[in-house]
């Protein structure tokens, strides 16, 4: 006996309200997102977002960590996959398509030999991911070409995909605590 997968759902009316509000007043769509990371010990870091439980981020033993949590680069891939999953479901819902499976698999090529600026640091060294490959698996009640359109639209409008693909300004200020 086979079972039918449960539909993946979000509030379609809420999605429509969110969209309409942003179209009527673009300022409602602009947000400042905040996170705070505090080192626990060694390379174990707790990252705090809103009032949620903190997320542990660390390093594997090969990078002198205790292997208790994803490392920052793996967390970046996780953010990429989660953002795409959200976008896929929102786009499908907007189009009236019911999805029963969303799976986003990511892999990224990274050279850690220059890690933290203490290793092999020639000026031409590529820092961060040099390539990221994504495989999206969808199941739903739409033809393949509609699922492809949902995929393409989610990829095009993903904030995290766009952060990976485009340069973003980063500023940092040092606050010394003695």
Image (spheres, grey):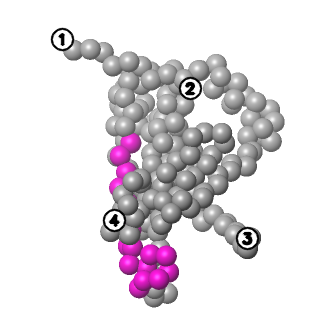
CA separation in Å, label 4 and label 2 = 44 Å
What residue do we see at 73% from left, 28% from top?
20
The disc placed on residue 61 is 4
Q: Which residues are magenta?
A: 104-120
Mark 4 lies on a secondary structure that is helix
Q: Is residue 139 above or below residue 61?
A: above
Residue 99 image-quadrant placement: top left
Mark 1 lies on a secondary structure that is loop
Q: Mark 4 or 2 closer to N-term?
A: 4
Tag nearer the camera, 3 or 1: 3
How busy is the neighbourhood of tag 1: few (under 14 within 10 Å), some, or many (20 plus)?
Answer: few
**Which residue is identified by label 2?**
94
Q: Is residue 139 above or below residue 54?
A: above
Tag nearer the camera, 2 or 1: 1
Q: Position of residue 14 (x, y in %)?
A: 65, 22
Q: Position of residue 108 (x, y in %)?
A: 38, 60
Viewer-proximal residue, 40 or 2? Answer: 40
Q: Mark 3 or 1 closer to N-term?
A: 1
């Amino acid at each position: 006996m086979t079972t039918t997968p449960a539909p993946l759902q979000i509030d379609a009316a809420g999605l429509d309200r969110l969209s309409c509000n942003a179209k009527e007043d673009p300022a409602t769509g602009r947000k400042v997102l905040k996170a705070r990371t505090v080192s626990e010990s060694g390379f174990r870091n707790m990252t705090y977002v809103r009032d949620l439980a903190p997320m542990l981020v660390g390093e594997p033993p090969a990078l002198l960590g205790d292997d208790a949590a994803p490392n920052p680069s793996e967390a970046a891939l996780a953010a990429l996959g989660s953002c795409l999953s959200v976008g896929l479901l929102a786009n499908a819902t907007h189009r009236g398509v019911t999805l029963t499976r969303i799976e986003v698999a990511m892999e990224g090529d990274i050279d850690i030999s220059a890690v933290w600026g203490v290793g092999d640091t020639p000026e031409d060294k590529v820092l961060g991911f040099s390539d990221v490959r994504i495989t999206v698996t969808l199941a739903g009640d739409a033809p393949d070409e509609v699922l492809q359109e949902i995929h393409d639209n989610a990829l095009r409008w993903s904030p995290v995909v766009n952060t990976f693909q485009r340069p973003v300004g980063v500023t940092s200020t040092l606050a010394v605590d003695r």
